[in-house]
Structures are given as structure tokens and as C-alpha cells.
Image (spheres, rainbow, N blue to C red):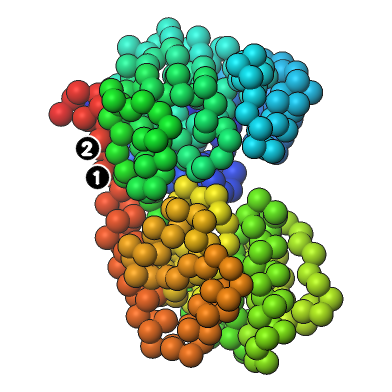
Amino acid sequence: MKKIGFVIPWFGFDIPGGAEAELKGLTLHLHEAGVPIEILSTCVQNFNANWNCNYHKEGTTTEKGITVRRFKVRKRDADAFNEVNLKLMNNQMPTEAEEEIFNREMVNSPALYRYIREHKDEYSLFVFIPYMFGTTYYGIQECYEKAVLIPCFHDESYVYMKSFKREFSKVAGMIFHAKPEGDLAEQVYDLTNVNAQVLGEGVYTEYTYDAARFRDKYNIREPFILYAGRKDVGKNIYTLINNFREYKYRNQNDMKLVLIGGGEVKIPEDIKKDVIDLGFVDVQDKFDAYAAATVLCQPSTHESFSLVIMESWICERPVLVHEQCEVTKHFAITSHGGLYFDNYFEFEGAVNFYMENPEKAKAMGLAGRKFVLDNFAWDVIVGKYMNYFKQVAHEE
């Protein structure tokens, strides 16, 4: 097999979370397995940086043994982009002319697209992640027959853009993290000629975890619901906070809510004594927190995978997810490792079930752990991806 080029809007081994973290783990493990890997990206620092600013030096570097090629970005009209993006964020579909503005004024690098066009014979495949950025939209147009998309879809307005429907039907392959993501793509796009498969996402499974160590370090003796991740509206965290507030009003027990991760959130005065916001913690503390929790609650309604759920299961603890997120609900049902809620009373019932049935909660956590080990451990994922890439590249 020739080289596989992974294309992403920005790259750095120090960028946390999301598609960036997935790409880092996948490329490192494929590289260790002997697959020839390169990463093609822009000089932009990260998602939160100025997309007009070339932070990294243009050119080729070697990072953790992997070749990384970075290309300068084209200047963009941020105001024009923001105007269209605001409509999409408010679930208003843009016109075709507005879609053109959205794609054109996204983060874009003509030098990157030219490189793909001029060097595509040197590569077996180009793998693009995630779906909505200019590097994906324009990049695949240079190599349809060698383009594989890891879209990270969830049900949102961007998925339904006509330009995406047109272009994504032309790629050679598409990889999904979970069956509901694949089902959504099948409903929206014409995948007749696309090798589309559910392969999942790799999860590190070798962590150690110690519930007592966490409780001793942070002096938390009471049972607690754990939230792990970025604390913002987009993750639906206020649904969890409001449900917890109602829970404390209706249940006179010592249950706490522990938050770990970045971001700020407003806690109502009447429950401040029961909410413990630890902010960023180190990796070992995070896994100890999973192990100590009564349950991990993932309230987000927009997930294409959810690493925190997998990490909770690795630490043998059950989860509670939102019914309106098809992916996390699917994982909870399929694994037998969690429950889901759509309103306060279902939330209360689930929390009290875990409180009152510790042995069943433990069994659910163990079922979740088995689910992760069987489906998403890195040796399993690397095998799936290597076989898939050979199929799409016709190099079996």
C-alpha cells in the first residue's frame, strides 16, 4: 500500500478533544502497525484561533515519527461567513449562493488542494475529517476516487446543505463511528457508489483507576453524578444542572454533582453546596473520578461517538445519556451499560435506580467495559481500518 494522507483543518499533538484527538490516536496506532501515514493540514493553530493566521511555519515536519505537511491558508471574509453560519446555527437553511459563501469563506488552503491534485498518485487514499470544513469540501474535489470521509455527523443543519449532498455522494468511502450516524447519512446522502461502513473509534483501554484515591484526594465522601467534558450550552449541560436542582428539591439525600473539564457554568445559589466544579484535572484523577462516580451523565444531544462514555465504561461505571441523542442512546442500549432520559422524571428514576441497586449498577458498568474492549480497543480498530483501507484502495 502506498501512503495514506489524513487531511484535517489544523493539527498538533497538543490539541485536545474531538476530531483532532481521534486523528492523533488513529494515525499513531496505524503508524505503529506499519501503515505509511502522512498528515496534511493548514498552518492554523486550532479551532479557536484566527483562521486567517498562519501560526505554524509552512512546510514539512516529523512529529512522533509521522510526516506532517502544513500549508498556508487563504485570507477569508469572516463577516460574510459568520452571517451565513448564524443562519445555520439557528437551523435556517441557506440559499445556494449562501452555501457558496459558507464554503468559500471557511478555513481554506489552495496550496493544500494543489498539493493533493499534483501528488495524488503517490497516495493510496486521502482521509478527510471532519465534514464541514473547507479542507474537506474542496480537498475531496481533487481526488474523489481516492477520498475517504470520516464525517463525524450528527443531526444538525450543516448536514443538509445541498453542496454537501452533491459532493459527499462522490467520495470513494465513508467511515462512521456508530450505526445511527450511518443511518443519518443514508437518509440524507446518495451513498450508492460509496463504500460506507461503521468502524467505530479507537479508545485507550489500559488506564488504571482507583475510586478511593479520588475520594481521598478531593475529600468527596458522598455519592455523586459525574459530568466530564467541556462545560458549555452546546453540550446541554444546563439540562443536567436544572435536573439536578429539581432532584435535590425532591430527594432529601446527600447526592452531589461533580463537574470536571474546561469552561464556566452558572450554578444556582440553592444547590451550590451540592455542586463541585473541579475544572481541569489530570488524566489519572479523571479516571479515578469515573471509578468513584455513581453514574456518569452525558446530557449532550449531538454526539457522533462520545469518548467520555467509553472511558466511564472502561472504569466499570454505568452511564446516563439523553434519549434525543441517537448515538449515545444506541450505545447504552447495545452495551447494556446505561440508561437514557428525556425528561426530569426519567432522570430522577435512573439516578435512584443506580443509587438503590449498586450491584446492578456494577454489572452494567462491567457490561459497558466488555462492549468497549470488544469493539473499540485499539488493536480491534486498527485491524478494522487496515482491512477497510485495502478494500477502498482495491489493494486486497
Which residue was labeled with disc 2?
A: 387
Q: Is 62 on the left or on the right of 172, as rendered? A: right
Tell me, for residue 383, which label it has, or none.
1
Of residues 295 and 262, the one drawn nearer to the viewer in this rendering: 295
Q: Residues within 10 Å of mark 1 (few under 14, many from 20)?
A: few
Where's residue 54, x and y in %?
A: 69, 24
Q: How far across and down, in percent of the image, does residue 282 sit?
A: 60, 65
Badge 2 local density, few (<14 within 10 Å), some, or many (20+)?
A: few
Residue under the image location 58 percent in, 12 percent down: 110
* Side of 54 where 174 appears, left or right: left
Compared across the picture, whether 159 is left or right of 100 comes to left
187 displayed left or right of 87: left
Asked whether residue 3 appears in the rendered view, the answer is no
Q: Secondary structure at mark 2?
A: helix
Query: Picture quarter containing residue 166?
Result: top left
Q: What quarter of the picture does the C terminus occupy?
A: top left
Q: Residue at x 52, y 30 (%)?
A: 160
Kindly indicate the quadrant of the structure image that contains residue 351.
bottom right
State how many labels appear: 2
Q: Residue at x 44, y 53 (%)?
A: 327
Nearest the viewer among 24 and 153 is: 153
Spot occupied by residue 213 in the image (x, y as percentages of width and height): 55, 82
Question: Could you tell me the amino acid type at mark 2?
Answer: Asn
Q: Would you place residue 222 above or below residue 167 in this image? A: below
Q: Are marks 1 and 2 in contact (CB under 8 Å)?
A: yes
